[in-house]
Image (cartoon, grey):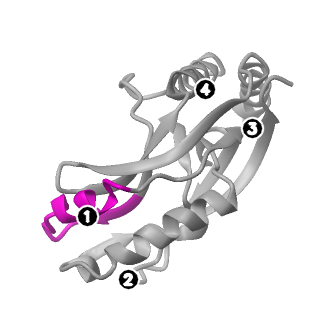
Amino acid sequence: MRLFVAVLPPAARLAELGVAVDELHTLPGADRLRWAGRDDWHLTLAFLGEVAEDVLPDLHARLARAAHRTPPFGLRLHAGGRFGDRVLWAGVAGTTDALRLLAERADAAARRAGVPMDEHRRYHPHLTLARSRAGVDLHPYVESLAGFEGAGWEVGEVLLVRSRLPVAGVPGETPRYEVVGRWGLGV
C-alpha cells in the first residue's frame, strides 16, 4: 500500500487558510492550476511509497516510539511559497525545529522497519495548495499569501496515511486518503 506520515492541522486552522486560498482563485491562471482538495490538506513528514503489508507491524511500532519521543509543539500556517513553477504551498512557522525532528524520526522509523526510502532530502515543511503543468506564473500567488498568518495550534499527534491514487482517469480526480495509524506525541 502507498503510505506517508503526516501532521494534520486542526479544521479551524485549515478554514483560515481556506479564506486566503479563496482569494487566490481570483488571480489570472487559477483555473489552470490543479488545486489540492481542502479535505486532504496536511503536512507530509515522510513519503514512504509502496509498503509491503508484512512491514506494517514493525513500522507501526517504530512510529509509535518516534511519536512517544517527541513532545507536543506549537505551529501555525504562515505565508506561502513555491517549488519552481510546479508547486504552490502554504508555509509553516512556530517550533519548526521540532517538526523537522519529527520528520527525521518518521523517516528513520520507516528505514529501520525496512521501507526502501528514496535518497534523504532536507525536510522543507509546507502544505501543498496547488500544482501546475501549464506553466502558470506562481509569483502572484506567493505574493498574495505573503501576509497570511494563521493562528497557532499544538501538534499533538502523527498520522500514517494511505494514499489511493485515482484509477478512473477522470480529469481532476485526486487521491483518496485514509488514516491507518495515529499516535499521540509524548505519550
Seen from the viewer's position, the closer of residues 46 and 16 is 16
Q: Earlier in the sequence, mark 2 or mark 1?
A: 1
Say which mark, if any, is on residue 157. Answer: 3
Pointers 4 and 3 in contact (C-beta within 8 Å): no
The nearer-to-camera label among 2 and 4 is 4
Q: Secondary structure at mark 2?
A: loop
Instruction: Determine the CA span between mark 2 and mark 1.
Output: 23 Å
Front position in the image: 20 or 70 = 20
The correct choice, above or below, for 80 with respect to 116 in the image is: below
Give coordinates of residue 11: x percent, y percent.
68, 62
Spatial distance from mark 3 to mark 2, Cα to Cα? 34 Å
Does the CB distance between marks 3 and 2 fall below 8 Å? Answer: no
- Tell me if I can see residue 49 in this picture: no
Q: Magenta part of the protein: which range?
A: 129-147
Q: Which residue is mark 1?
A: 141
- Amino acid on which the number 2 mark rests in the picture: Pro
Asked which quadrant contains residue 115, the reply is top right
Q: Residue at x 41, y 70 (%)?
A: 21
Number of residues whose C-alpha sits closer than 10 Å to that of mark 3, classed few (under 14), some (14–19) or many (20 or more): many
**Is 1 situated above or below 26?**
above
Could you give the CA–CA distance between mark 4 and mark 3, rounded to whole angstroms? Answer: 12 Å
Q: Is residue 156 shown left or right of residue 133?
A: right
Q: Which residue is mark 4?
A: 106
The residues tagged by marks 2 and 4 sit, at their Cα atoms, a distance apart of 33 Å
* Left/right of residue 100 with respect to residue 39 in the rendered view: left
Q: Residues within 10 Å of mark 2 (few under 14, many from 20)?
A: few
Q: How many marks?
A: 4
Any part of residue 2 in sight: yes
> What's the residue type where badge 4 is placed?
Ala
Query: Residue at label 2?
Result: 171
